[in-house]
Image (tube, rainbow, N blue to C red):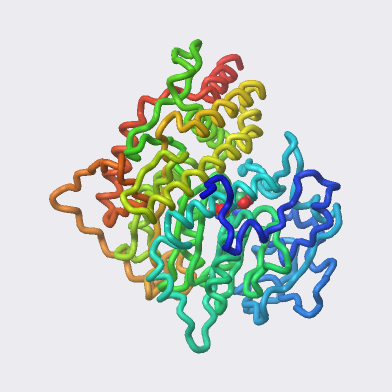
Amino acid sequence: MNTDQVPIGHNGPSKIKSAPSEPGSSYNNHARFDQMPQNYTESQADATATTGSHVEYPSRSKQPAHAPNGNTDNFKGRTVDPSDTGRTTDDASFYSYHSARDLANFVKDFYGRTFNNQSDIYMMPSDSAEYQRLNKQHYAFVLGLNGLFPCADSVNELLAPREGERPAILDLGCGSGIWAMEVATQFPHCEVVGLDLAPVPVDIETLPPNCRFEIDNADLGLQHYHNYFDLIYVRCIGSGISDHRKMMLDVEACLKPNGIVFFIDGDQTIYQEDMVTPIAVGQERDEGGNPHDGSWLHRIAREIRYAAVYNGCDVDGLENCIDYGIWDHELIDPSTVKVASMATPLGIWAKARDEDTQQRVLYTGSLVRQDLMGASRGWHPMLLKYGIPQETLDKWSQRIDDELTSDKFRMSMRWRFTWGKRRANTTEDSTSGGDNETPAPTVPPATPPYQPSIADRTDDFRFMDIYHTREEAAAMADLRRLKAKDLPTPMVVKIKKQLSSSG
Ligand SMILES: C[S@@+](CC[C@H](N)C(=O)[O-])C[C@H]1O[C@@H](n2cnc3c(N)ncnc32)[C@H](O)[C@@H]1O
């Protein structure tokens, strides 16, 4: 098997036309469909005149903007009919942005890459190279999870076709749109919405008719979608969120009773094969290290973690909220909550006991290796902003390529998960704590206290560790933090301190 190619046979990368990053290129000629801007700030709304323009597919009528609660406040600068239920009665409605002027309202170019124009917090690119990276990462998730979700049985039961109902699914921060389109294909009776800061590079020929995309900033609140979705998938959007817990509570309010939510994000610590002990961080000699001893991937990942904090992203909130689970969230039924770690090897060093798992492990390791080589360059603009020179970043990325392609270290990446279902008896918009709510049952303490154990993965790679109680999840999170507490101070932190001390 050639492990360096994105798998085919899914509704995936081979079918998605990505947008070249340079404006004025063919990017502007590709129709981009059904991406209604939502939730605009007033200044964005004033500067934007795209919705409803250039209707290219009149056979599919435009539906009004979504305001399921008749709430027009969230649609600043736009008029919303309060009688509109917000449900699209037809399949997707199609609009295209086919002028440079329209696209310029949604993306901007700097440092030679294209970025979204809605949020200054999120600083990864929104361009062709990034979408290809995300598609590889998506397939690593599919292989690690053996599907699109960590608990397929519960999802299949939840989304089973029922008379008179059309389940709705949200992919929040959908990136290239690949997960949204695959879930729409797998559940053709469901309505699927992909929402992102930037337009999604989809092609009308492969867009499932039950899937549509919207441009929106989840950081501005999603009140217009409260009580609307049966399933919400939130994967790797943490670097665009200023208050993670607030976002999670808001997302949970967008579920219908019994609806399920998945929160997933990456861990910027790079681990040894046990998935608990950090790999050494790369350091130059003048920083007290030996450049050959530590991982430069781990170095850049740590730099980006701290740069993201300076840029307004709630990294601590992300780490705490996912690693310690959503047991205490008011709308969530604690008996349904899980926390999990998905391990992906970085490279093709890992061994599994059975042939099927071995193939999945090799493929995943190859995909994530390519994913992170791309990510290391996607992170440059953010690190440049916080003072790391381009020559240094280029040197680090070259070292990352070398260490990943040579499998110099047996490194693994950890993906943090938490999921749970909304309680059955919350039907109104109850983020304010209305009378109709049953208080969340208290979670009994585990007795005896859970002792975290470190599994030996040396010859038996395992993708998923699931923690069934808050105590288990917390014990593992605490252990990882303890082991990472002496990692070296990132350069962006030193630069920031120097700048503040020099006034
Ligand atoms: C790392 S990508 C992950 C994409 C996709 N979820 C996946 O796993 O393939 C993060 C995506 O989240 C989007 N995003 C980040 N912050 C967001 C926000 N506040 N509102 C909406 N989308 C956001 C970004 O534009 C980007 O496409």
Residue at the top extreme of this rendering:
286
Residue at left offset 60%, top offset 64%: 11
**Viewer-proximal residue among 192 and 375:** 375
**Viewer-proximal residue among 143 and 110:** 143
Residue at left offset 37%, top offset 32%: 278
Residue 412 appears in which quarter of the rendering?
Answer: top left
**Viewer-proximal residue among 11 and 89:** 11
Quadrant position of the C terminus in the picture? top right
Left or right: residue 296 versus residue 176 is left
Residue 152 appears in which quarter of the rendering?
Answer: bottom left
Say whether residue 322 is visible.
no
Residue at the front extreme of this rendering:
1
Say whether residue 357 is visible.
yes
Picture layout, residue 232 above or below residue 394: below
Residue 183 horizontal/vertical position (percent): 54, 67
Residue 494 horizontal/vertical position (percent): 52, 20
The tally of labels here is 0
Left or right: residue 164 versus residue 204 is left
Residue 91 horizontal/vertical position (percent): 67, 78
Residue 22 appears in which quarter of the rendering?
Answer: top right
Residue at the bottom extreme of this rendering:
163
**Viewer-proximal residue among 246 and 139:** 139
Left or right: residue 106 versus residue 360 is right
Residue 492 horizontal/vertical position (percent): 55, 25
Residue at left offset 33%, top offset 53%: 354
Picture layout, residue 154 above or below residue 19: below
